[in-house]
Amino acid sequence: MLPRRLVRLVSLFSRFPGVGEKTALRFVMQLLTDKSGLAESLASELSDIQTSIRPCERCRNLAEVDPQGRALCSICLDPQRDNTKLCVVAKVQDLMALERSHVLKCRYYVLGKLLSPLDGISPEDLPIVELAKLIASDSVKEVIIATPPSVDGEATALHLVRELGSLGIAFSRIASGIPHGGDLEFSDQITLGRAVLGRRPLEIDK
């Protein structure tokens, strides 16, 4: 029912996570009917995205390549960040989620992967050496491990502590528990256990 080129476009959009064929078709139809230059702008931005955006040289977050060919993200360029604290995350999306919380004002480091024997990811595949060099160069005093509360995330957290423990720094792990507005009866036993173990004193304002 559609021209072959439109079918190919729908197929390409459908390859994005969470985008089905119907949503992909809506995207394509929007591009066809839009009069504001959306298609041209999109094509221009996509034409060199894989060469103009690459991992930050310092923390492996996404960064735009500058005229000198260097790639440093906005967080690493921010002089207001606390260099003594380093938050280690599994992926860039986790970093973005933590930034949206507006709680941390520290530096980050993106591992890019988690230990996963089933997926063939071993300790040798983690950037431990690079992470250790960053900790030493920035005089980091605390490493906040913010890997997911999963089997792979916990294994990775423990491995980081074992490998970096000799650096004489403090380690902390983000807490996990009942989400805001959640019901206890629908929480799994691991989440409930962590919520209890991570409890804090409750004080009444006087």
Image: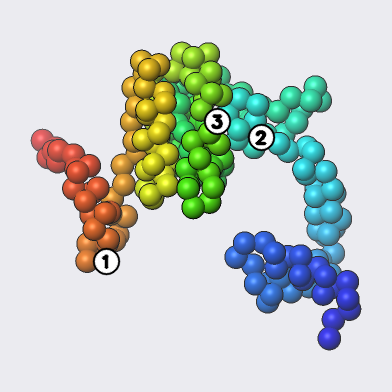
**Quadrant occupied by the C terminus:** top left
The residue that label 2 is drawn on is 55
Q: Is residue 26 above or below residue 81?
A: below
Is residue 18 rendered to the left or right of residue 29?
Answer: left
For marks 2 and 1, the one nearer the N-term is 2
Q: Nearer the viewer, mark 1 or mark 3?
A: 3
Q: Residue 67 sits in which quadrant?
A: top right
Q: Position of residue 93 (x, y in %)?
A: 54, 46
Mark 2 and mark 1: Cα distance apart in space: 39 Å
Q: Position of residue 137 (x, y in %)?
A: 53, 13
Disc 3 residue type?
Answer: Pro
Query: Residue at position x 70%, y 64% from top?
Result: 15
Secondary structure category for the residue under label 3: loop
Secondary structure category for the residue under label 2: strand
Is residue 141 rendered to the left or right of residue 61?
Answer: left
Q: Residues within 10 Å of mark 2 (few under 14, many from 20)?
A: some
| Count of marks, rendered view | 3
Disc number at residue 186?
1
Query: Residue at position x 50%, y 40% from top?
Result: 122
Q: Nearer the viewer, residue 1 or 104?
A: 1
Q: Residue 86 sits in which quadrant?
A: top left
For marks 3 and 2, the one nearer the N-term is 2
Disc number at residue 127?
3
Q: Position of residue 155 (x, y in %)?
A: 39, 41
Query: Residue at position x 56%, y 24% from top?
Result: 130
Disc number at residue 170?
none
Mark 1 and mark 3: Cα distance apart in space: 37 Å
Disc 2 residue type?
Answer: Pro
Q: Position of residue 46 (x, y in %)?
A: 80, 50
Q: Residues within 10 Å of mark 3 (few under 14, many from 20)?
A: few
Disc 1 residue type?
Answer: Phe
- Asked whether the viewer can see residue 128, the reply is yes
